[in-house]
């Protein structure tokens, strides 16, 4: 009880100053990026704040899901440098480097398919379809909703194959949910990049935790259904899970809770320090005992598996499936309950600033 009180006080102390400082940094880096744009690029990057493009998300490649905004590959070098500053103001170094690695893996994936095509493992018709999917390092789109210079509510979306970053700012508060990261392949098995794993700890900590459970705990944590073909809260499905499944944190021993904390921290730790500290303070105020962990599928890498980490405040999903018996394709998501696309902070902002 005492620990919960302390963490609640920490949360109260951190909240306003951290948000205010961070929103100013976000605004400054975003305006710095806008000032580098050329010609009609400024018109292309903006969407209105009510535009449905702000609140629709997908991880599909460009060939299957056209995007609004400005194509990253069309930016000048100056603009790319400025946008990398935006990314590094949103994320910790960990989250920033994951974003870059996921983008880079798109080009590696092209190379891997071209090698398989040359080896006769992929036929010409299939290769033609793959090329039209248009996954590419440059085929990520940035859209700015509203105007950060004049509006106190605005947003930024950066999205493409296996990335969906959704920033919403309301006054001195901001949110980064939903945040989708994926990687195909999860581990690069050929080319000079062999061994690269953009989402390594998301996978490793999941296996560490499930295999740290005793047989009774593992049976309770493991759900009997088939591994989902994608995360359950994918774009075309309900965006929140209402039912808690698996094993509750209060049923784990201290060492197992610590591993669960490492796993949660890997997702929260993608965000810039102040935001990560805010989420961790919420987690600690609620208590690790209220967090559920569920697993589906194999307990070994490279075979299909899935896990979900679920509390009353947040949701983490991870899915690793692939072709045949080679699971090497990760989808993952971080969500804060009731706050997708800033829903909660926007409501609070309207109530606090009635016109």
Image (cartoon, grey):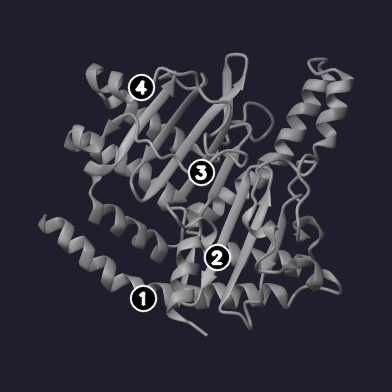
The image shows residue 57 at horizontal and vertical percentages of 64, 49
Mark earlier in primary sequence (1, 3)? 1
**In the figure, residue 315 lies in which quadrant?**
top left
> Which residue is denoted by mark 2 in the rendering?
168
Q: Residues within 10 Å of mark 2 (few under 14, many from 20)?
A: many
Please give the name of the residue rendered at 39% of the width and 32% of the height, measured from the top-left corner.
Answer: 206
The image shows residue 313 at horizontal and vertical percentages of 36, 51
Mark earlier in primary sequence (4, 2)? 2
Q: Residues within 10 Å of mark 1 (few under 14, many from 20)?
A: few
Mark earlier in primary sequence (1, 2)? 1
> Which residue is denoted by mark 4 in the rendering?
222
- Helix, strand or loop for disc 3: strand
> Which residue is denoted by mark 1 in the rendering?
16
How far apart are the two marked residues, 1 and 4, measured between alpha carbons?
Answer: 40 Å
The image shows residue 139 at horizontal and vertical percentages of 76, 49
> Which residue is denoted by mark 3 in the rendering?
333
How far apart are the two marked residues, 3 and 2, measured between alpha carbons?
Answer: 17 Å
Q: Residues within 10 Å of mark 3 (few under 14, many from 20)?
A: many
Mark earlier in primary sequence (3, 2)? 2
Please give the name of the residue rendered at 17% of the width and 38% of the height, measured from the top-left corner.
Answer: 254
């Amino acid at each position: 009880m005492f620990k919960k009180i302390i963490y609640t006080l920490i949360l109260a102390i951190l909240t306003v100053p951290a948000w205010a400082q961070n929103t100013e940094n976000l605004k400054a880096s975003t305006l710095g990026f806008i000032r580098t744009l050329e010609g009609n690029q400024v018109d292309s990057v903006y969407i209105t704040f009510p535009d449905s493009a702000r609140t629709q998300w997908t991880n599909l490649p460009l060939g299957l899901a056209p995007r609004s905004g400005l194509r990253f590959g069309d930016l000048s070098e100056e603009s790319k440098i400025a946008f990398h500053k935006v990314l590094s103001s949103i994320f910790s170094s960990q989250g920033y480097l994951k974003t870059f690695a996921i983008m880079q893996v798109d080009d590696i994936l092209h190379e891997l398919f071209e090698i398989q095509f040359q080896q006769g493992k992929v036929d010409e018709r299939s290769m033609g379809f793959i090329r039209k999917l248009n996954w590419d390092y440059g085929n990520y789109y940035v859209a700015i909703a509203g105007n950060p210079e004049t509006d106190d509510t605005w947003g930024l979306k950066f999205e493409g194959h296996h990335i969906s970053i959704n920033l919403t700012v309301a006054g001195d508060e901001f949110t980064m949910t939903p945040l989708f990261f994926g990687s195909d392949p999860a581990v690069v098995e050929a080319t000079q990049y062999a061994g690269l794993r953009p989402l390594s700890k998301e996978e490793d900590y999941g296996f560490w935790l499930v295999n740290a459970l005793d047989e009774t705990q593992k049976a309770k944590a493991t759900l009997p259904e088939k591994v989902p073909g994608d995360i359950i809260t994918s774009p075309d499905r309900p965006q929140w899970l209402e039912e808690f499944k698996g094993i509750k944190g209060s049923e784990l021993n201290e060492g197992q809770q610590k591993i669960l904390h490492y796993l949660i921290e890997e997702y929260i730790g993608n965000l810039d320090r102040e935001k990560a500290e805010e989420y961790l303070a919420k987690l600690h105020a609620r208590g690790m005992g209220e967090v559920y962990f569920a697993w589906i599928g194999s307990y070994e890498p490279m075979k299909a598996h899935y896990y979900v980490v679920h509390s009353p405040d947040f949701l983490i999903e991870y899915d690793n499936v692939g072709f045949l018996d080679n699971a090497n394709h990760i989808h993952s998501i971080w969500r804060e309950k009731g706050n997708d696309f800033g829903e909660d902070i926007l409501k609070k902002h309207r109530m606090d600033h009635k016109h």
